[in-house]
Amino acid sequence: MSFFDRLKDGLSNTRRNFTDRIRELAGLAAPIDEDLLEELEMILLGADVGVSTTQKLLDAIRTAARKKEIADSSEVLPFLKKYLTELLREEGQRTRIGHKPTVILVVGVNGVGKTTTIGKLANYFGLFKYKVLIAAADTFRAAAAEQLCVWGERAGCEVIRHGEGADPAAVVFDGMKAAIARKADILFIDTAGRLHNKANLMNELSKIHRVIKREIPDAPHETFLVLDATTGQNAIAQSKVFTETAHVTGVVLTKLDGTAKGGVVIAIKEELGLPVKWIGIGEGLMDFRPFEPEKFVEALFEK
C-alpha cells in the first residue's frame, strides 16, 4: 500500500466527519444562503477546524458566491478543496538540513508521542544516509531514555543519555559535543513534557538553549512541537504555552489515523501561524512522513 493510500485510509474518520458530510449537504445544488452556511459551520466546528478558521472559510464562500465564482452548494466542495490547499501551502514546509550538525529540538507534553516521533524521524533520515544522534534530555519521565534507546537501536543511531533525574542541560551539552566530534549530520534533542507551569518551561528551555548556542550560535535550527491530533482543539490550547516560549518552527501531528478531528491541521496553520511539517498516521516506521498539503487535501476530499 502506498503512503497516499495509507494516508487516505488514516483520514477515513475525519473524512466521514468532514468532507462526506459537506458532500451530502452540497448534493442538492441548493442556494448558498445563511441556512446552508449555518449547517456548514456546524460541520467545520465538529471536525475541529476551529472557530476563527471556520469563520474565515465561511466568509470566503460568501465572497465567492457574491462574486458569482460559485453558483450553488454543489460547487462548495471543489471551492473548499482549492482554498484549503492554498491555505496549507507554505514556504519552509520542509525540514531544513544544512548545518552540520543540524540541531533539532523536540518539545511537547507527555503522551503526544514525542519519543516515538524522535525515533521515527531518526529512522527516516537514516534511510537517506544521514548520520543521526539523539540526546535523551527528558530525564524526568521514567523510562524515557530507555524508550529512546530502543528506537535508536531500530533506527541504527546512537543515543546520548544520563541517569534518571540528571540535569537535562548536561545531557544536551554531552549530546552537542558528541554530535560535533562524531561529525553527525543531525542531532535530535528530546525534552521533558511534564513541566508544571510556563515559568518552569521557560527556565528549562532557556538553559537548554544557552548550552546549544554556546557550541553552535545559530542552533537549534528547528524546534518541533509534537501534538496529538486526537485531542483536536485541546492541542491548540496546549500548544500556546510552547509557541510563546520555545521558538517553535513547525508542528509534528501524530495519531491522525485515530481521530475524526483532522481539521485541526487547518486550525494549527491558521490560528498558530505554524506549518505542519510531519504527520503520523499509524504505528509503523513508514507511517510517518513529511506533510504535503496537496496530498493531505486530496486524501481528505477523495471519495
Image: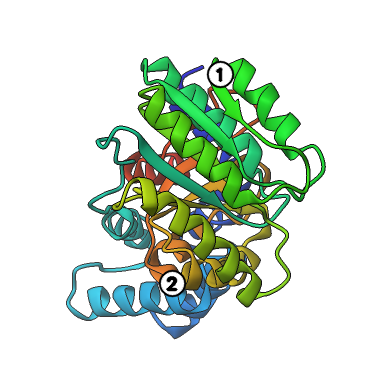
Name the one closer to the observer, 88 or 94: 94
Residue at point 58%, 69% (across, down) = 203
Closer to us: 297 or 16: 297
Measure how far apart labels 2 and 1 are at the Cα level: 34 Å
Report whether residue 27 is seen: no
Q: Residue 227: where, in percent of width, then height?
A: 58, 54
Asked if the residues shown at circle 2 and circle 1 are in contact, with their CB atoms under 8 angstroms apart, the answer is no
In the image, residue 273 sits, relative to residue 146, either above or below, namely: below
Q: Give above or below for 82 relative to 51.
A: above
**Could you tell me if residue 87 is visible in this image?**
yes
Along the horizontal axis of the image, is 275 left or right of 43? left
- Give me the disc on residue 271: 2
Image coords of residue 291 (percent x, y)? 40, 41
Secondary structure beneath label 1: helix
At x 48%, y 64%, the residue is 246
Badge 2 density bin: few <14, some 14–19, many ≥20, Cα 10 Å: some
Would you name the residue on which mark 1 appears?
Answer: 155
Q: Which mark is residue 93?
A: none
Q: Is residue 127 left or right of residue 167?
A: left
Q: Amino acid at mark 1?
A: Ala
Q: Badge 1: how crowded within 10 Å, few (<14), some, or many (20+)?
A: many
Place of residue 225 in the rendered image (x, y in percent of width and height, measured from the top left): 51, 54
Per the image, label 2 sits on a secondary structure element best described as helix
Mark 2 and mark 1 lie on one chain; the one further toward the N terminus is 1
